[in-house]
Amino acid sequence: MVTDIVVPHLGDSVLEATIIKWVKQEGDFVNTGDTILELETEKANFEVAAETSGVLKSIGRIENEDVEVGDVLGSIDSTAKPSKSSTKKEDAPIQVKAEEIKTVEQTPSEIKATPVAQNIAKQENIDLSHVAPTGVGNKITKDDVNKYLQSSPGKTTKSESVSESVSSELFPSLSLLNSNRERRVKMTRRRRTIARRLKEAQNIAAILTTFNEIDMSGVLDLRKRRKDDFKERYGVGLGFSSFFIKACVGALKLFPELNAEIQDEEIVYKYYYDIGVAIGAEEGLVVPVIRDADRKSFAEIEQDVKDYSVKTNEGTLTLDELMGGTFSISNGGVFGSLLSTPIINPPQVGILGLHKINQKPVVVDGEIVIRPMMYVALSYDHRIVDGREAVQYLVKIKELIEDPEALLIEG
């Protein structure tokens, strides 16, 4: 019996995916549950598993090809038996002679690389064993592959070869000028989705940004006094995320317009607080959601943020962890940003942008003192949020952060 391999249901509103790679090849024997191929969607990566045991009879769609839910990707012949070579490889006990142990020990471990890094390496004909990994879990990242390309000026990439062959025929002199100056790489599914959604946000919403400046002395002092005890008690570090998430929740309760959305001609006010936290990933920005942040302690929020960061680096975030959200926070300060105007994530109507903390002179009680200051930005949808509410919301954030103990009462 031949069973088709189809693109499974990928989650609500997710209809398309891109084939990252085939884990199994034609002729391989697979068991039920074995991963056959990996797909990339706009939100997360998926592993497609075999629904039956048998031989992978055919592969109908290639890597980097876009597919839709329900498309047939290949087939498995459940009546076929594994070949002797595959049986020997998978089931036969391995016997190693004493004199061979040294050779076995010297065999390099399996190379780990992110899907984007693998795609670039394939397109540019790069042997990943020559690339030094810097990612989590000794994994090769996109930046590692790009660094390898830049450190090999004499290497001609596949895309450059095509460009040079065309230009040399039409404009022979240009082939010398364009050598090693351009590289063409197909946008990943996630990057295309990010581009589309950000443009849609600007086309649909009336986005406006208001700014303020926060004295971070109170938070920094509290963290300094409590961080060791916090770490010992809860097993997680006390960062800035929990303070700002708690402050956002406290301010959203006072200004519910920023925790709402527009549906047709109605405003839907939400009295639950699912806060999205933007995390920069190699494949593109992701915004996992901390559910019911108003009901969680500082430690629970910090643990959620830590877990999401690890999953983002490993590419293991699930669709459920990325769906929904009533308000978002983006921290460009971790990359050194001093000021920015974040773009809202529809259907949300507000996003808080955090930035780098700078020591600067400020006037306090008529005297000039040096304080750790941070610019904050609130982008909002002016269709349902007026400037007065937006400014007052940001002022409330400022008040809560500058008096962090108030978060225990109002947050």
Image (cartoon, rainbow, N blue to C red):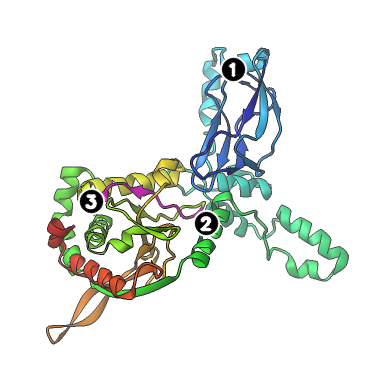
Q: In this view, does 330 lie above or below 372?
A: above
Say the numbered circle drawn on residue 131.
Answer: none
Residue 137: percent from left, percent from top:
43, 41
CB contact under 8 Å: marks 3 and 2: no
Amino acid type shown at disc 2: Ile
Query: Which one is nearer the viewer's eye here, 169 or 32?
Result: 32
Q: How many labels does the image show?
A: 3
> Could you say whether the residue bearing mark 1 is in a helix, strand or loop?
loop
Residue 99: percent from left, percent from top:
54, 19
What secondary structure prevails in the magenta region? loop
Q: Is residue 253 above or below residue 128?
A: below
Amino acid type shown at disc 3: Asp
Mark earlier in primary sequence (1, 2):
1
Query: Which one is nearer the viewer's eye here, 179 or 210?
Result: 210
Q: How far apart are marks 3 and 2 (CA)?
A: 28 Å
Region of the chain picked out in magenta, as a range: 284-294
Residue 261: percent from left, percent from top:
38, 58
Q: Inspect the magenta stretch and tell me whether residue 114 lies in it.
A: no
> Could you say whether the residue bearing mark 2 is in a helix, strand or loop?
helix
Residue beneath disc 2: 194
Q: How crowded is mark 2: few (under 14 residues within 10 Å), some or many (20 or more)?
A: some
Res 356 quadrant in image: bottom left
Residue beneath disc 1: 53
Q: Residues within 10 Å of mark 1 (few under 14, many from 20)?
A: many
Residue 179: percent from left, percent from top:
73, 64
Residue beneath disc 3: 294
Q: Which residue is drawn at 17% across and 49% down?
A: 230
Mark earlier in primary sequence (1, 3):
1
Q: In which quarter of the image is the C terminus?
A: bottom left
Is 94 on the left-hand or right-hand side of 319?
A: right
